[in-house]
Amino acid sequence: MYHLGLEEDLVQVVDERKQVDACVIDFEKAFDMVPHGTLMRKVEALILDKRVVEWIGDFLRRLIPVQFSDEPYLEKGTFLLYVQADEPETSYCIPGNVQHQKDYSRINGLPEGDEPLYNPALIKRLNFTQISSLFSPPISAANPGHSLLVRPLCRGDYDRGFLQLLSQLTHVGHISREQFLGRFSSMKACPDTYYVTVVEDTQTNKVIAAASLITELKFIHDCGLRGRLEDVVVNGDYRGKQLGKLIVMTVTLLAKELGCYKMSLDCKDKLIPFYNSLGYIDEPGNANSMTIRFDSSSIFKNPGITAKL
Ligand code: 16G
């Protein structure tokens, strides 16, 4: 097997009139969600050369090395596999490229051609059945309701009203497209840390709810992972559709899925009953959240501050 880093190499193979069949394998599904026996039975049911089937079997048993994608819009675990039917032992595995972005978006239910902040497959695998009693009528991240889509924040959400939505929560400021994209890239450059999640109304192409999970690496708790729930907001026009519960529980289940040992939040006092109803509690003797603000207007007004910071 050869790893081809350049599209030109593939073009060359085609130029040499060798047959090249292409298929996309999603590692997450292949390795983590689908029993390999079932997957192989499905592969065997396809009309493929026997050696191709054997090659995929070897591949699933990790007997064949695989190069993961370096492309910024493709998550680790998504790559393109070219299996040459007459010579499967010389099949190719290459990172996806820009041409495949549209397919990637379609497969993952993202706005066409857009880039997600994190792997959308993580949302799809969340198990809402364990919290089904919270929702009436039943909804989940996979089935949030007519024309609604729960997904990671995407670059294009600058134009889908994400910042205007956040301004219903607190001060946002005037953020240019460049600033937004720069911050998005910075978040994306911190692997496995920022999980900004949104609900989109696909009829209006507007982001109408959002919540963020931020994970924090710890030394304590056996080098554990702590989750923080931040920036929860639902567009006022969409209240009464259980979207607050939905977006909070989506990132809460995500924190659990990612192995966080706890998830915590700060909120306005009036929202305490809402978060209590979702399982968040003021732990006895451990329920304080304190703040020091560094904006010049308020820092010296905090009682008790005697030294200049
Ligand atoms: C709320 C938010 C917090 C956000 C803050 C903004 C939740 C659970 N909490 O406390 O994430 O950062 O409001 O308020 O969404 P600020 O502008 O006063 O910092």
Image (cartoon, rainbow, N blue to C red):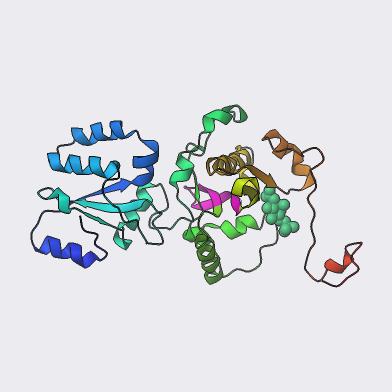
Which residue ends up furthest to the left in the rendered image? 17
Task: Please state which of residues 274 and 13 is positioned toward the viewer in this rendering.
Answer: 13
| Residue depicted at 34% across the width and 41% down the height | 30
Residue 77, can we see it? yes
Image location (x, y in percent) of residue 127:
51, 34
Query: What number of labels is visible?
Result: 0
Q: Which residues are magenta?
A: 196-216
Asked if residue 164 is positioned above or below residue 127 in the image, the reply reads below
Q: What type of secondary structure mainly makes up the magenta span?
A: strand
Q: Is residue 209 located in the magenta-colored stretch of the structure?
A: yes
Image quadrant of ligand 1 equals bottom right
Image location (x, y in percent) of residue 244:
63, 42
| Left or right: 242 as drawn, with respect to 117 | right
| Residue depicted at 19% across the width and 65% down the height | 9
Q: Is residue 50 located in the magenta-colored stretch of the structure?
A: no
Image location (x, y in percent) of residue 238:
61, 44
Which residue ends up furthest to the front in the rendered image? 222
Task: Please state which of residues 274 and 63 is positioned toward the viewer in this rendering.
Answer: 63
Image location (x, y in percent) of residue 267:
74, 48
